[in-house]
Image (spheres, rainbow, N blue to C red):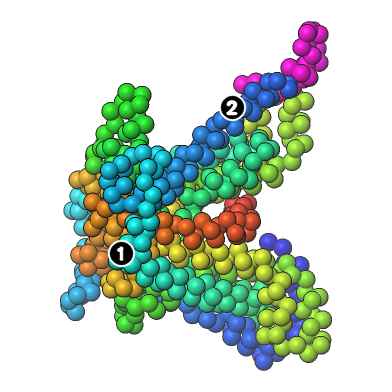
């Protein structure tokens, strides 16, 4: 971060001048303090109570909410596994697809912008609408099964099948977000100077070697940004699951965020929901740290 | 994989090396195009499907739900969901929410970003760090307490409750501050010598210069609020206040028999954003490219 004009503020030393700083920043600071800092503290507080918004009786119960989630609530473990499965599917799925699409897009001259626009489209249209369309595509006689029947494969009832429901949600999510990350990779590739490729060619590198030894290492920072951001979002998946499967069939697609929603807003167990959200927060935080550390230790230059 | 280097030591044959290279490249280019077009079709197909299903009409859809080229054309489904399906009302609500948040958040963010970039006041750096730190808090962990705060001050199930938590954005403040730091100080100094007040400098010099950044962030804000589902879902219980996303989700449960209506309603939720995207594409793509590189 460069701040060239940082030291040139002699006019700002009198109190009458810095009051305006508080006036300008005040509204934002008040809002952020309330809805982020107070909120996060309040969430931790609530997680130690049997906090029900219907009854006024809210006893302190210490760590019971956490113990319930970790040791008694089978659905917590199930939804943790489901969420992990989703993350394991979506993060590499999107990262690899976006990288390959950007590689292809970077190579073509004609129509690059048009392709980029088309790939990006699902990222800016509401997930609810897209999930509704996919419900129909995944229906027993939907387009996907019709396409499969053309090659002689009898497709399952995707969203109502315990084995296929989560993979179906993953595929839809990859479709929905891959364009966003393709745009990020394209911007990264545009920043690699041509000299690097020229040098590789002089050394006799083929196309694969160019990708492996020039493009990939130079995009390490972009990849680390993409996987960390994606991981954070993927752990909080909600809308697609809520619309497409409501957690079913059975509990095959209940995710942690859906469990938080159910406990907080359907059973009104705010304390328990807050405790689950803190466990989710810890998992996200630790994994992001490990990832960033991993990338840093691999840094080449 | 084909090789693109020209092998100068190769024996001269009927096909000269350069011609050979050019032909190989073109084969590969064709393959790349084929792949990209295939994926583009995959990306667009759900939209095409949604569009044709919404104009087949209820009877046309029931009689022939799977054809890729509609045999009937009727605006009945689109008209039905607009009025009797309340989509007109939901759209109006979405427009209100997204516009209010857009205007207020842009103002709040810009004022704060200017203060953090250009005004020296006690505690400024600590406060800015605190703002940045909130970027690490996941949405999940804020959902329950944000609802409880809104509920405690009596704003649950109100339109104000939907918009107020979105009135400031740490991300927006951070991006705008970066932008303001790059505006030359001389511009401001000249105005100050002429006796301009801070407010005037902010509104007449800084804001006009920051227009591209403000448009980019404004587009993100509008699209974000329009597409948001979780927050309005939890904070509202009165369906007359629902935005389009929550209103649309009702179609999943209630109208299983009327898929044409679901598609028609989805069209209304999707199209305004597609138009905004096509118009503001330059800013949106540019903004995202920047995010990735800064990260």
Q: Chain of mark 1?
A: B
The answer to whether B202 appears left or right of A49 in the picture is: right
- Residue B256 appears at what percent x and percent y? 24, 52
Q: Which mark is residue B85?
A: 1
Number of residues whose C-alpha sits closer than 10 Å to that of mark 2, classed few (under 14), some (14–19) or many (20 or more): few
| Above-or-below relation of B84 to A21 | above
Region of the chain picked out in magenta, as a range: B1-20
**Residue B73 as seen in the image, left or right of residue B179:** left
Q: Quadrant of residue A138?
A: top left
* Secondary structure beneath label 2: helix
Is residue A177 found inside the magenta-colored segment of the image? no
* Residue that appears at 59% across and 27% down: B31
Spot occupied by residue B37 in the image (x, y as percentages of width and height): 55, 35
x and y percentages locating residue B63 in the rendered image: 27, 43
Quarter of the image for residue B214 reads bottom right
State which mark lies toward you, 2 or 1: 1
Can residue B173 be spotted in the picture? yes
Q: Is residue A7 left or right of residue A97?
A: right
Q: Tell me whether marks 2 and 1 sit on the same chain.
A: yes
Examine the image and state in which quarter residue B237 appears.
Answer: bottom left
Q: Decide: is B229 above or below B64.
A: below
Examine the structure image and report whether residue B3 is included in the region drawn in magenta: yes
Location of residue A225 in the rendering, given as x and y in whole percent from the top left corner: 55, 49
Question: Depth check: B178 or A148 in front?
Answer: A148
Q: Residue at x 60, y 56 (%)?
A: B281
**Label 2 sits on residue:** B31
Does residue B118 appear to the left or right of B223 in the view shown? right
């Amino acid at each position: 971060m460069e701040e060239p004009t940082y030291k040139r503020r002699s006019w700002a030393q009198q109190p009458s001048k810095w009051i305006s700083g508080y006036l300008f920043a005040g509204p934002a600071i008040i809002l952020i303090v309330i809805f982020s800092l107070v909120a996060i503290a309040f969430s931790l507080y609530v997680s130690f109570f049997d906090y029900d918004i219907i009854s006024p009786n809210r006893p302190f119960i210490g760590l019971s909410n956490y113990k319930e989630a970790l040791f008694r609530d089978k659905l917590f473990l199930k939804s943790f596994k489901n969420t992990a499965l989703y993350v394991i599917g979506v993060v590499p799925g999107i990262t690899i697809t976006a990288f390959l699409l950007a590689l292809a897009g970077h190579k073509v001259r004609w129509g690059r912008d048009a392709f980029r626009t088309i790939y990006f489209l699902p990222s800016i249209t509401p997930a609810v609408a897209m999930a509704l369309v996919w419900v129909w595509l995944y229906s027993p006689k939907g387009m996907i099964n019709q396409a499969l029947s053309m090659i002689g494969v009898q497709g399952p009832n995707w969203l109502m099948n315990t084995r296929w429901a989560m993979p179906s949600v993953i595929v839809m999510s990859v479709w929905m977000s891959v364009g966003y990350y393709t745009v990020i990779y394209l911007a990264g590739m545009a920043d690699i100077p041509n000299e690097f490729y020229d040098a590789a060619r002089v050394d006799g590198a083929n196309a694969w070697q160019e990708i492996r030894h020039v493009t990939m290492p130079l995009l390490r920072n972009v990849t680390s940004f993409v996987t960390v951001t994606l991981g954070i979002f993927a752990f909080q998946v909600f809308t697609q699951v809520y619309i497409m499967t409501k957690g079913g069939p059975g509990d095959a697609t209940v995710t942690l965020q859906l469990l938080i929603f159910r406990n907080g807003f359907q059973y009104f167990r705010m304390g328990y929901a807050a405790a689950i959200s803190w466990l989710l927060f810890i998992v996200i935080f630790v994994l992001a740290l490990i990832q960033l550390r991993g990338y840093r230790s691999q840094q080449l230059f | 994989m084909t090789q693109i280097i020209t092998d100068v030591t190769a024996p001269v044959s009927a096909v000269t090396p350069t011609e050979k290279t050019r032909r190989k490249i073109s084969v590969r280019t064709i393959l790349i195009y084929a792949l990209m077009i295939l994926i583009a079709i995959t990306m667009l197909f759900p939209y095409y499907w949604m569009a044709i299903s919404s104009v087949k009409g209820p009877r046309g859809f029931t009689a022939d739900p799977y054809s890729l080229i509609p045999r009937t054309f009727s605006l009945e489904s689109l008209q039905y969901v607009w009025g009797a399906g309340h989509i007109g009302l939901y759209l109006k609500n979405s427009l209100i929410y997204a516009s209010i948040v857009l205007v207020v958040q842009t103002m709040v963010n810009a004022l704060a970003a200017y203060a953090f970039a250009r005004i020296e006041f006690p505690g400024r750096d600590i406060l800015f760090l605190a703002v940045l730190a909130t970027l690490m808090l996941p949405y999940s962990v804020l959902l329950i307490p944000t609802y409880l705060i809104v509920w405690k001050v009596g704003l649950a199930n109100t339109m104000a409750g939907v918009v107020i938590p979105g009135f400031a954005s740490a991300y927006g403040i951070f991006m705008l501050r970066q932008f303001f730091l790059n505006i030359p100080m001389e511009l401001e100094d000249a105005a100050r010598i002429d006796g301009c007040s801070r407010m005037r400098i902010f509104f007449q010099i800084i804001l006009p210069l920051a227009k591209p950044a403000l448009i980019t962030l404004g587009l993100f804000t509008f699209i974000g609020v329009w597409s948001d589902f979780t927050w309005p879902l939890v904070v509202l219980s009165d369906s007359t206040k629902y935005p389009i996303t929550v209103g649309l989700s009702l179609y999943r449960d209630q109208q299983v028999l009327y898929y044409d209506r679901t598609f028609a309603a989805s069209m209304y939720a999707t199209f305004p954003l597609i138009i905004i995207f096509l118009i503001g594409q330059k800013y949106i793509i540019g903004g995202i490219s920047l995010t990735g590189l800064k990260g």
